[in-house]
Image: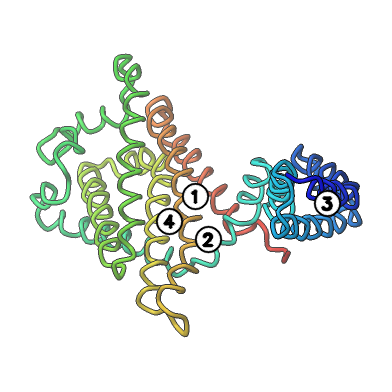
Amino acid sequence: MSETARLRSARFREQREADWKRLEELVTRAERGAAARLSFEESQELARLYRSATTSLSVARDVSLDKALLVYLEALVARAFIAVYAPQETLGGVVTRFVARSAPQAMRRSWLGLLLGFLAMGLGGIIAYALYFQDSAWYYTFMPAGLAGGRDPGASTEMLRDALFDTDHNVLASLGAFAAFLFSHNTRVAFFAFALGIFACVPSFLLTLYNGLVLGAFVALHVERGLGYEVFGWLSIHGVTELSAIAIAAGGGFGLGLAFLFPGDMPRKDALRAASKDAVKLAIIAAIMLFAAGLLEGFGRQLIQSTEVRLAVGWGIGALWLGWFLLASWRRR
């Protein structure tokens, strides 16, 4: 570089270096997590100095100043851009905002999709229950053999009762692995109910309906043997959470499908993009609930042998979910 160019770079840096140092100080504070504690005046100063630094960088490139100065300014501007425009929120803040505001608001906005999800499951349960009492052979149509575990119309009443109140220590020892399997299975069901909703809602409706058919046939078998109250408690401890999670995941899928079918005044692509924001939140809620249901199913259902306690635990936890969805974050921001 010629002597003239070096003098020009030195003069350019001398005139602006104080602002660059001040910008670097503010950016460093923001990077250390103190951005939220910057005063209003300091935030304004940060934005002003960032714009000034971008102008300096543009000028430095145009007049071909020395490379070291360009590298310094490029790094400073990049850091300042993140400090000014990137969301300054910790992971804890994101989780708190989701739990306290985003999730329950998304649930309330998605009431139509959720209604369709619960209706599909309930309809399936009613159909299978009615068909079983017409002909018990329908049980084998609705219930997968692997899921039934020997609990079918050919089983004795005592065998069915023992399965509801099994305290065998070997069974209890395997409950952790059983819970992991059920969590994986139910997650797949909820995932497909969510993901397939975009295809005009039909696949999600059929999948959720089928889950209702399985449930209805299972309940009908036990009601026929005089075990209706017992199976209701057995299912309640985990089913209130688990079945609600599947219906919620389906509700997210229905939200996407409804946006595809009825985009309104927006282009279909924009309608899907808007609907996906709440749909993804519903999928996250369903995943959280399925995890809780996996723990309840794998441990609480067999460790708790009283039907009354099972009912209290299952519906008590269900009331907590409902309270979260209905009561949280009604205040407008």
Q: Nearer the viewer, residue 33 or 202?
A: 33
* Amino acid of disc 1: Ile
Measured as percent of width and height from the top left, residue 207 is found at 26, 57
Q: Which corner quadrant of the image does residue 55 belong to?
A: bottom right
Location of mark 1 (residue): 285
Location of mark 4 (residue): 248
Q: Is residue 84 visible?
A: yes
Q: Secondary structure at mark 4?
A: helix
Disc on the earlier residue, 2 or 1? 2
Labels 3, 1: front one: 3
Q: Which mark is residue 8?
A: 3
Disc 2 from disc 1: Cα separation = 9 Å
Disc 3 from disc 2: Cα separation = 61 Å
Is mark 2 in CB contact (under 8 Å) with mark 1? yes
Disc 4 from disc 2: Cα separation = 9 Å
Residue drawn at point x = 61 percent, y = 49 percent: 99
Q: Is residue 37 visible?
A: no
